[in-house]
Image (tube, grey):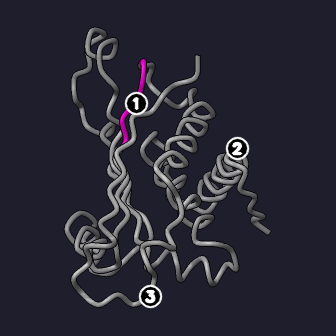
Amino acid sequence: MPPKVELYVENSFQESTPPIAVNIEASQITVSEYTWENWFDKWLEILTPDLPPALSYEIGLRLTNDAQIQELNAQYRQQDKPTDVLAFASLETDFPQSEEMLASQPLYLGDIVVSIDTAQRQAQQQEHSLTTELAWLTAHGLLHLVGWDHPDEESLMQMLKQQVILLDAAGIFINLT
């Protein structure tokens, strides 16, 4: 049976108080919660070999703006600049997980934060839709949640190829060349 995900999507993009560098209406962000859940279900099925066994998994997804992601990037990565995606993996901590816990509640994988501002700019640069860029960045964040990393060029290329596989499963086609 494929793994299931309990996904919590927070769109704080509409709540932005600082001026936004890219003018995007909230209505242009066309990814529904159903679509997000569908994508994550498919992606987790593909990533099952990378996952600790559990009945289901829990992930937080926050869509935000450059100002808010810059605050997080400065606080957690000591880089005082906006970025496209941040992933806060819970599996990196030594949190005790008993079999009873895993049998009765979802395994929390962590949180993914995506800047809509940066995603929109990158979508324009790559000449694809904002939806495609959001899927790309979120898949990248998910890979970080399950233990993937890219400290060098070779591992980055492997991770990017895995992102292509994940997006392909969601019906989104990206060519890396």
Q: What kind of residue is marked 1?
A: Tyr
What range is drawn magenta here? 55-59
Disc number placed over residue 169 in the picture, else none: 2
Residue 36 image point, x, y percent: 51, 48
Q: Earlier in the sequence, mark 3 or mark 1?
A: 3
- Label 3: which secondary element: loop
Q: What kind of residue is marked 3?
A: Val
Residue 64 image point, x, y percent: 34, 69
Q: Nearer the viewer, residue 93 or 66?
A: 66
Q: Residue furthest top?
A: 100
Q: Where is mark 1, residue-wise?
A: 57
Name which residue lies at 60% across and 53% down: 155
Residue 30 image point, x, y percent: 53, 64
Residue 116 image point, x, y percent: 43, 73
Q: Nearer the viewer, residue 164 or 26?
A: 26
Q: Earlier in the sequence, mark 2 or mark 3?
A: 3
**Residue 144 vertical position relative to residue 124 in the rendered view, above or below:** above
